[in-house]
Image (tube, rainbow, N blue to C red):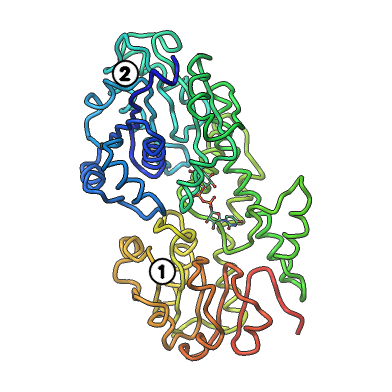
Amino acid sequence: MKLDDIKQISIIGLGYVGLVTALCLASKGYMVRGVDTSPEIVKSLNHNKIPFHEPQLNDLLKTSLKSKSFTASNDVSEVIQESKLVFISVDTPANPDGGIDLTSIKKVSQDLGAQLDDTFRIITVRSTVIPGTTDGVILPILERESNLKAGVDFGLCVNPEFLREGSAVNDFLHPDRIIIGYLDSSSGDFLEQLYEPFSKNIFKTNLRTAEMIKYTNNAFLATKVSFINEIANICRLTEGIDVMEVAHGIGMDERISSLFLRAGCGFGGSCFPKDLRGLIHFAKEHHYSPILLEATLRLNDFQARYLIDLALSEIASLENKKIAILGLAFKPNTSDMREAVSIRVINRLLQYKTPLSVYDPVAIPNTRAIFGSKLTYCSSIEDCLKDADVCFVITEWDEFKSLTPGQFKSLMKTPVIIDGRKIYDVESFSKEVTLMQIGFKPIS
Ligand code: UGA
């Protein structure tokens, strides 16, 4: 199949990954048909509204709806008929044991299999799935439901995504590399043609290796973050060593690189914690206990407690103190609260039965859905800081970075700031307020 044969592309599953893929491909001139089982998502998209916060996506939606290069529907059969390329990007949520729940992907494979006919279509798995899932679970369902042979009557590929929330559109349009796992080489070659305008750095391999690359990528980056967080905690054992400078120094070594060495109060999101647990579960199922991956997770859990311990080292007790929390989303530029560090910090602080005021530019509705009436939700930084005894900075939103020590001092009752993201300059802040920071203790 040649790229010119493609008039229409279908994307099944319109969450973060599916929607970014759909709208970015639509922006490149493809006719993209999206499907999702949720009537709310489909309705919202067809009414020009992205159901979550992601920069640039609203503009892409607007343009592609106008040019009719994107439409959303609830019905797979309606959508795939004209499409020779179908991406599966449904969610693979975590089970309580760390394994992944394949209910959605199995259902989609069934529905899709039932629609396959003698038109050669390429089915591409973009969801993050444990190695062996595409050939061991998805392929047999597709073959059973269609009575066709994978690799002969239809193509099968795995194309993991490396899109970061908050910069997903840019990551799609300017990827540093593309990974393609394929069953039949012609389908692999076809996807390569599709992606060539986006990146020349394309690596093709087998299905399982592509699945493993995705998990390894996230596990490595998460381990890098936990590693620098551990070094940050060690830096604070003495005075005058700033972990940021340490990270800068080691990052100059090309073998290490300075990316993903921002020390802080831990990583969150829907990917790192889930994928680490998924990989650990996979290894254990095969009777191997992964020492390093488990340590990466443990250190990450510890980091939230460490932040509170930092506060306690300064003020002895948190009881009857008014606490302000700046930043709730798992990272800036997203409203996503999944596995956010703020949840771990808040849960621990709630044990002190102390009033908690929280503020985030976009994540308040998602936080309210988790904590209900247990917190005071503020509509501005000022409201949140007013009369507080301690302030925890959990997410490094730009609007927090520009706060001055004078603002903290004038608003708070006692200006004790616990900087979980290392966004303030300790030396200058310390002249006016008490600033405790991850990874640096100034010389006294
Ligand atoms: C991550 C990967 O970066 C993407 O490549 C991947 O496609 C995605 O997961 C996924 O599997 O779908 P994402 O979870 O959106 O993307 O966010 P990241 O930017 O990777 O950040 C993850 C967490 O690490 C955040 O909580 C962030 O605050 C933390 N982090 C990141 C640090 O604490 N320090 C750093 O230096 C970098």
Callout 1 amino acid: Asp
What is the count of numbered marks? 2
Quarter in which the C terminus is drawn: bottom right
Residue lying at 48% horizontally and 72% vertically, measured from the top left: 399
Disc 2, ligand 1: is the CB inside 8 Å?
no
Q: Is residue 316 left or right of residue 151?
A: right
Q: Where residue 253 sits in the image (x, y, percent)?
A: 79, 50
Q: Where residue 361 sits in the image (x, y, percent)?
A: 39, 68
Mark 2 highlights which residue?
113
Judge the density around disc 1: few (<14), some (14-19), many (≥20) Cα neighbours within 10 Å.
Answer: many
Identify the image quadrant of residue 421.
Answer: bottom right
Quarter in which the N terminus is drawn: top left
Residue lying at 48% horizontally and 20% vertically, measured from the top left: 190
Q: Secondary structure at mark 1?
A: loop
Q: Where residue 75 sits in the image (x, y, percent)?
A: 22, 30
Q: Is residue 223 left or right of residue 408?
A: right
User: Which residue is nearer to you in this view: 136 or 246?
Assistant: 246
Residue lying at 59% horizontally and 62% vertically, measured from the top left: 303
Mark 1 highlights which residue?
360
